[in-house]
Image (cartoon, rainbow, N blue to C red):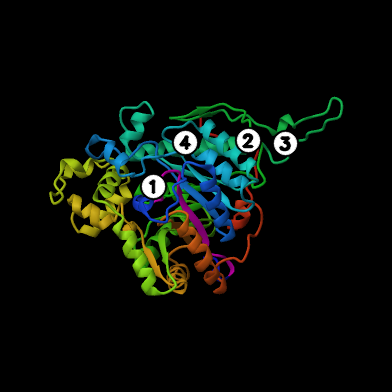
Amino acid sequence: MADRRRRDMTLVAFLQAQNCSNYPGSWRHAEAIPDFLTAEHYMRIARTLEEGKFHLAFFDDRLAMPDIYGNDHRPAVEYGIRSVKMDLIPLLTAMGLATKHLGLGGTYSTTYYEPFHVARTFATLDLMIGGRAAWNVVTSLNDSEARNMGRTEHPGHDERYDRADEFIECVLGHWQSWEDDALVVDRRRGGTFADPNKVHRLDYQGKYFASRGPFTVPRSPQGQPVMIQAGQSGRGKLFAAKWGELVFASYKTLAIAKAQYAELKGAVSAAGRDPDSVRIAPPIYAVVGETRAIAREKEAYLASLAQPEDALCLLGEILNFDFSKHGLDGALTDADMAGITGQHALRDRIIAASGTNNPTPRHFIEKSGRGTIYEMPVFCGTAADVADEMEAWYQGEGCDGFVVAATHRPGAYEDFSRYVVPELQRRGVFHQDYAGTTLRENLGLPKSVARGAPTMRL
């Protein structure tokens, strides 16, 4: 592994284009600013994050409300459980125009979009914000998304990843099809706009996707967008090891983080890639106070904002399973467990934590922390206390950085940037300023260089 004294901790802000942050109860917070339907809301957050020298602001997304619990959307709407989900590209564009260095990433599905569309969308975004874009690759999760996109049910777990492999091959092929010096823009009489020998047709033909080209968007200052991935299941882990440049991985404890971090880095190496070229970052909440007592009081208030409906709706969404058919303490059958076709990493984590192959809905709620601030590790205390935790994970090789989720917006990011970032900088584990103007420069990743006409599967 690279010497950590010579590489900075990566910091990513975890955002949602909706009425709440990752914490569904965050909109109930007394200090939450309810202008989430305006560009200024996200531009304000972007400026705060850039002042805090965050590498990236990243938006998670789903293509449906969490309406699987009881086959009813009304609880999600009534309780504000991620019931608003706006398209990410206009938000990312606004945030990019409000900043100069902050990277900006968005989630687009390989299950319900076409490769050419995603390739063009993110290549254009990358140009418009000066080479700071990232694409978070997801395979989507549930039947509600399928029905919104004209399908009757969501494809199986492994099939989604097989499709996603082809999807990425196709997207990367398009991104690589303009060589870096293809543009000439010689305006003299009879001049040349671009060298036709340096713009290549793709002619991709796979089992799931076909796309001819030529692609219509030239290369950006960083070459092409950074690839984000979050797979943690067996198949998902292989997918992340093959394609991810920035990988989000959920770890509950430092001990688990160390073991799974090493395993994922090993998978990257086995895929023929340099493990030091891939950043792995788990999500956390940070609750900061001037004293530990104040921080604990803040934490208690945050925890009180959660409602039971939050957990049940969100579990149904991510696992593609309706828990309303079961009592809280009724064990799920083997058939029930096989019917969980959403996020296998979460399902497997609940099995391990509960010690049974047939956990109850209560196990899923308590062991996952879904819908509460305890879904992910909570680093609570003074700025020094929070920095101690982060440094222990980072220096202990449990991660390369963190995905910082907001307990409420925009205050959580203002507190983190004002208090925790200077403490991390003082300790020498986080950069003092941005290394360059592109996301790849700031993450320490090399510029992507076009290889010309790609070799595609036929």
Q: Residue at x 30, y 52 (%)?
A: 370
Q: Residue at x 33, y 45 (%)?
A: 81
What is the spatial separation of the Cα atoms under label 1 and label 4, in whole angstroms? 14 Å
Q: Could you say where residue 223 lies in the image, as x and y percent from the top left? A: 64, 45
The image shows a total of numbered marks equal to 4
Element type at marker 4?
helix
Q: Residue at x 31, y 42 (%)?
A: 317
Q: Residue at x 56, y 35 (%)?
A: 121
What is the spatial separation of the Cα atoms under label 1 and label 2, in whole angstroms? 27 Å
Residue span colored magenta: 6-22
Describe residue 1's horizontal placement relative to residue 223 as left or right: left
Few, some or many C-alpha atoms within 10 Å of disc 4 (few <14, some 14-19, many ≥20)? many
Do labels 1 and 4 touch, CB within 8 Å? no
What is the spatial separation of the Cα atoms under label 3 and label 4, in whole angstroms? 26 Å
Q: Check the image and name the residue furthest to the front.
A: 30
Instruction: Residue 111: name its quadrant.
Output: top left
Is 283 in front, or is 312? 312
Describe residue 101's horizontal placement relative to residue 160 as left or right: right
Q: Could you say where residue 103 lies in the image, as x and y percent from the top left? A: 57, 51
Is residue 398 placed above or below 184 in the rendered structure? Answer: below
What is the spatial separation of the Cα atoms under label 2 and label 4, in whole angstroms? 16 Å
Discs 3/4, front: 3
Of marks 1 and 3, which one's residue comes earlier in the chain?
3
Q: Could you say where residue 348 lies in the image, as x and y percent from the top left? A: 28, 52
Is residue 55 visible in this depiction of the protein? Answer: no
Q: Which residue is mark 1?
A: 236
Q: Which residue is mark 4?
A: 166
Q: Which residue is mark 2?
A: 177
